[in-house]
Image (cartoon, rainbow, N blue to C red):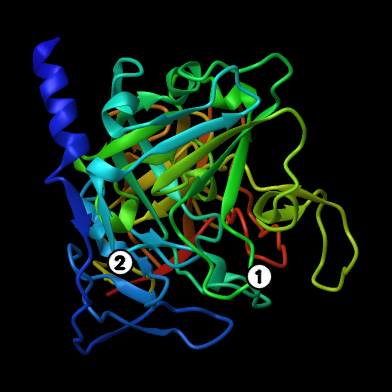
Amino acid sequence: MAGSTLTRRALIAGAGGAALAAPVLAQSLVDLGLPGGPSLRPLDPAFPGKGEMIVQRIRPPLLETPMDVFREGVIAPNDRMFVRWNWDMPTAVKAANHRVAVGGAVNTPVSLTLDEVAAAGETVEVVAINQCAGNGRGLSEPRVTGTQWGNGAMGCAKWTGVRLRDVLAKAGVTEGAKRVRFAGLDVPLTDGAPQFIKSIPMDIALRDDVLVAWAMNGEPLPLLHGFPLRIVVPGWFSTYWVKMLSTIEVLTGEDDSYYVAKSYRMPAAPITPEDKDFATVPITEMPPRAFITSHADGAVVAQGQALTLEGIAMGGAAALARVDLVGDGWELPCTLGPDEGPYAFRRWQVTVPQVTANLAQIGVRAANITGAVQPETLAWNPSGYARNVIERITLRPQ
């Protein structure tokens, strides 16, 4: 359809490229309430194209979304979406010069322009949560290594692109292919450090909703989010959502690259902080999670009055089925808001009929349609990955 083609081409080309100016220094701090170490984080410097963000690191940029953003809706505005880069990102990319090489176990290796990528198949839109595997890591007890995120290393957006399988078809996948591997334009900061390369199994790569995306919430991907192209794997952690996509490689065997074989892995079975030698499995699918966004821990509420709580929840790798408000020996079912798709946040709401005493250590528990449910206790691991323990707060009546 001509109209959609024009929109697609306008989105993917943007203004012909993208560039990132230097961040601007300001001065303010936020307390993330981390139990294992220093909690204060700066809200500066201000990065171009970004609103107020929690700055975990400047280079490569790690920017966390303040939790109050999640009170406003299920879609994170582009200027408030969290940012996570493992290595240095280019500060400028020219769309006309960009190519995506598709090779490995294919019939005919190809080097595709952005227009050729966009023309590989029909344009598809998917609403999906992008969440760092270490989201909430800073809340782990005992403390673990890595970026000490609060719970703001996540965000939901509408992603527009073409199916990865249609791009693969331009080269023709050979028989016996097992995985598809991706690399972007980011480069290691130190000599000898491994390039950031990730791969997914072939059955995941061929899904209807796994995209090579060029737009985010109806706008060209911002540079901080991977302009001009990124991989989108709904239901999987963002470590697989490779940004500034430049290479697609089809593999016939397992992937022995560092960020698959050695990193982004967690224990295959429950462990304790004292355990040292244990088998690991890669981080893949997201589990269900839910958050109270209407009230912060320690907030004062009206004594003797009804109390309405609100928040967001996700089903993770499958659609959300239900959310319950839970306390010490009691629970209340929550009402779910509009459904934006199986991989999106949903709003929830519940009313406590009357507040008569402290609402101590209350939380919300999400379950998805496969039966996966948030646990009462933390499944600790040394990297703080895949946190989905019920997050609890205490409210004080007055």
Residue 173 in view here: yes
Q: Which amino acid lies under the numbered mark 1 shown in the image of this protein?
A: Gly
In 3D space, how far apart are the residues under numbered discs 2 and 1 (Cα atoms)? 35 Å
The count of marks equals 2
- Left or right, 112 with respect to 283, comes to left
Residue at 55% x, 42% y: name it: 286
Q: Which amino acid lies under the numbered mark 2 shown in the image of this protein?
A: Pro
Considering every residue shown, the one lying at the far top of the view is 1
- Left or right, 287 with respect to 51, comes to right
Provide residue 241's location: percent of width, then percent of height: 47, 44
Q: Secondary structure at mark 2?
A: loop
- Left or right, 370 with respect to 356, comes to right
Provide residue 30's location: percent of width, then percent of height: 32, 81
Residue to which mark 1 is pinned: 192
Provide residue 281's location: percent of width, then percent of height: 76, 47
Marking on residue 66: 2
Residue density around tag 1, few if under 14, some if 14–19, many if 20 or more, within 10 Å: few
